Image: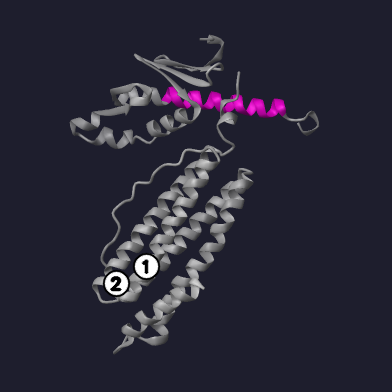
Amino acid sequence: MNTSNELFSTSKGQSFQCDLTSRVIIQFGEMDIRLKIKDFLSFRRFINNIDIQSRLFDLSDESDYEFLEAPQLNICRRFTLCELIQLRDLLNGTQFAIELNSLLHQLAFCPAELV
Amino acid sequence: MKDLLRQRTSLKEEIEILLNNQVKMEAEASAKYLAMASWCDRNGFRNSAKYFLKQSEEERGHMIKIFNYIMTVGGTAVSPEVVAVRQEFPTFRSVFEAALESEIAVTQSINRIVTQSRREEDYATESFLHWFVNEQVEEEDNARRAIELFDVIGEEGTGQYFIDKAILKLNQDHIE
């Protein structure tokens, strides 16, 4: 892995981009997943759509966890609400870095007279 | 570092979300028309039931059209979750009023996506949506004409029977 392609990091995890395989690598706790960009965007959207606020006010035991199952990505585990918030931070930061990179590419590939 | 977003699709994520929401809306509209068809059938309005069944099929067609577009441009199409729809209506007329309301909501939603795609300079999506803009004119017209029948014919006596008969004609007018 080329660590110079680090996208984002938090105290709980890191994300990288592998140019060789065109994958986004998410390392979060014991989780180490490699996602195609489309899968990354869908995964991020899924995590962002979990209504954490309503779960905080829900006193039932089931609302303390979210069970994530993605066999294709080899993910099959429970996430606590804290972990979900931390994962969300990591994914959103990664998304920001990917978008920023894309924007820089757009500017770099623009004909000079248009910039 | 490679630009992974560019490799994926030129479809912006926000537009992709809006289009997927539209897929869901069309699926819900299809389900609503099915409920209307069922209500009309069990209340003896056979022609109206047929009319709504056909409308339901059309809405599903719209859903598939958008779904297919998202896949064609490299986006992620999401199979929609259809919520429970209203099954009961107080009157024959209210069924058609609900249909018109639903069509207006769909038109407004399409317009919002057109506005957004123009803002994002996504001309492919805007061009694709033009078909829907025109289609909604016809759909709304259909729904409005149906309600007009209630005013023109009147519901007293055998009025509802004749309205139901005229509904069939309305459908045929648009098929031609």
Amino acid bearing label 2:
Cys
How crowded pointer 2 is (Cα within 10 Å; few <14, some 14-19, many 20+) is rated as many
Q: What's drawn in magenta, residue-wise? A: A89-109
Would residue B139 be found to the left or right of residue B164 on screen?
Answer: right
| Left or right: residue B90 compared with residue A2 | left
Asked whether B24 or A22 is in front, the reply is A22
Give percent across and percent down for residue A21: 52, 18
Callout 2: SS: helix
Q: Relative to B98, does residue A111 appear above or below in the rendering?
A: above
Q: Are marks 2 and 1 in contact (CB under 8 Å)?
A: yes
The percent coordinates of residue B48 (x first, y second) are 35, 73
Residue pictured at 28% horizontal, 22% vertical: A77
Q: Is residue B89 visible?
A: no
Question: The N terminus of chain B appears in which quarter of the rendering?
Answer: top right
Residue B167 location, quadrant:
bottom left
Q: CA distance from mark 2 to mark 1?
A: 9 Å
The spot of residue A86 in percent (x, y) is 38, 22
- Residue lying furthest front in this view? B176
- Chain where mark 2 sits: B
Task: Say which residue label 1 marks.
Answer: B52
What residue is pinned by disc 2? B40
**Image x and y of residue B63, in percent:** 44, 52
Label 1 Cα crowd, 10 Å radius (few <14 / some 14-19 / many 20+): many
Q: Amino acid at mark 1?
A: Phe
Q: Quick check: is A25 in the magenta stretch?
A: no
Quadrant hosting residue B47: bottom left
Instruction: Look at the image and say whether residue A103 sits in the magenta stretch.
Output: yes
